[in-house]
Image (cartoon, rainbow, N blue to C red):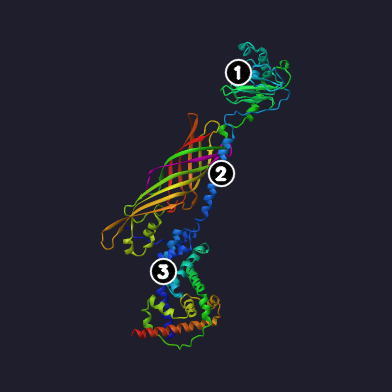
Amino acid sequence: MHPPHRIAEDELIKQCKSGSLKYQELLYKQFYGYAMGIGLRYSLNRDDAMEVVNDAFIKAFNSMGSYDIQKPFKAWLRTIIVNTAIDRRRKDLKLQLNIELDSAAPISGNINVIDSLNAQDILKLLKELPAIQLAIFNLYEIDGYNHDEIADILSIPPSSSRVYLSRAKEKLRKLIRIETQNHG
Amino acid sequence: MDNQFDDELKNRIREVFDNFEDPSADEGWLLLREKFPEKAKRRPVAWLWWSSAAAILLLFLGIWWVNSTPGGKKPTLAVAPKQPVHTLPAQTPAGKKGNVLADSVAITQQSQSIAQNTNHATSPTLKNHGDKNGQQPRAVAEKQNIVASKPSIDTAYISGKLAANSPVKPQMQAAAGNEIIAAAKPNAIQKSDTGNKSSVETLAAVNPPNARSQQPIKPNTLAYADNGASTKKEKLPNDRTIRLGAYATTYVNYARGSNNPLNLGGGVTADIRISKKFRVSTGVSVAQNRLSFSYNNQLQAPSSSAPNYLALAANNVYSTKSAFADAAPALKNYSALLLGLDIPLNLKYVFSPQKSDTYVSAGLSSGTFINEKYNYNYNSPSLLSPGAVQTHALSTKNDFNGFYFAKTLNFSFGTSYNFGGHKVTIEPFVKYPLDGLGSQQLRFGSSGVNLKFNIR
């Protein structure tokens, strides 16, 4: 039996540019995990993340003609997914903007425990963050946006972005410490 | 300390989610397809309607055209005379037959008689017809004079036989075999068809009966009449603008890896003349296409000739998980039965339209599949019992699943023969696929012979 092989990314994208449904399916399935990894970090739950991912892929398929094949596809797809997730939660984010910043004191977490965190653990921690803090933490720390870009995306001042990020990180430290204490 | 913690957390999150795996891709794809239906196939539905409407319109136009052409009626050409035509006495044999117009005398002759008479056209004396009947010497003389008098008749009906037999001029013999050449005032000269093969012609003259004094016709005049009429003669049936035909076809389908079963089909065709040697050929045909593939437990089926799902399974879906790949279904054999509606549009070049109907044609085919049926058998290894294999059969059906446009290249060569008065064309052909066809995007062609019956 011949070992199956992955179709080259370039070939997939080229065929998707021509509108081939078959190759769109292949592309979707090849990048689905990656896309869900992003979608889950920004979403409230799994169904939400799947909707974000699907909406992002539809946008990607529709705008595949404008995609520059010389640039990394993952980065392009990531941008679409992040924007889709933010757009989807924009209503939540606006409501969150009115919530006063909590004044949690900085608490150091346990560094050793971080390496043992799996996707499930991380998502559990992230869910504890308010939507605005979650979005800014993801945008800044994981997806590499700067505060000016975040300010544009979320329509907030850059200074607010900094404050929300600081609060998000503090809260994560606190949560990890609590988790560490709970599990010995 | 906090910064180090934050960096560690950040890196850990990146590491985990950049390599995130999720098993719900299939489910996600199905959900996506609900929001993202295939757009490309919607537009061709309009093409189907337009193409069908155009084909039907073409068919009806052709039928109307055929019906509007009076069958069996010989073409008539009238040329205004330079001088008045003379009237003959009413008691001619033609008049007795009822072919005489009011205030005119008609001269009726059968082709044979004309031929005989014309043999003497350049002679001042008349011997035939009247002598034979023993009663109409004068009328015959009148006939002779009319045919022979240049000033009174500028042009004249002359049968092909007349032209062939006439010693008057070589050009006459070059006249079209059965064509009748008319040369008289339209109202004065008519042709009647008695139903006899040697057609009866009537010349009606409206002028006084002094034709006898007319000068004999010069040979050049007949030649002129012949040539003039030849250029103006009505189109032959072969020169019709649209020619309809019906055909039956037998052929084999070919595709990479497929057996080549024999198939049958049939349809109607219309040839539209666009120039002397070129015609546009179109029509509608219904044909059955059968394909059969065997894979001998090879997973890697050619993507162009296997069901998408299995090809996907074989190539990609289980791409990184060898355990899944081992347990993946292996395509054993696969068959497709497609009833296609084909609308070709070909350009036809006729080598020598006057002599024969031998041609080559090339063009493109569009169409749809009235129904498609796919049967596939596959082996699926049992995970619980290594070595055990279960065979499963699956079949899918589709009706009118989209329209394909110009996806088949056509080549053909044809030549016509007469069989019992009907023109039959034998046309070997090849259809080469430019792209995948049908819902499974099978890339297949066909090669065979059309047997065409031309409708008159």
Residue B349, image x, y percentages: 53, 38
Q: Name the N-terminal-most of marks 1 and 2.
A: 2
**Could you give the CA–CA distance between mark 2 and mark 3, rounded to whole angstroms?**
54 Å
Q: Is mark 1 on a helix, strand or loop?
A: helix
What are the residue bounds of the magenta stretch? B257-281
Q: Label 1 is placed on what type of residue?
A: Ala
Mark 1 or 2, which is nearer the eye? 2
**Could you give the CA–CA distance between mark 1 and mark 3, rounded to whole angstroms?**
96 Å
| Number of numbered tags placed on the structure image | 3
| Tag 2 residue | B57
Q: Label 2 is placed on what type of residue?
A: Leu
Host chain of mark 3: A
Q: Which of B355 and A56 is in front in this view?
A: A56
Q: Nearer the viewer, residue B256 or B131?
A: B131
| Tag 1 residue | B115
Q: What element carries label 2?
A: helix
For label 3, count other residues whose C-alpha is less than 10 Å away and answer few (under 14), some (14-19) or many (20+): many
Residue B335, image x, y percentages: 37, 50
Establish if B234 lies above or below A58.
Answer: above
Establish if B323 lies above or below B175.
Answer: below
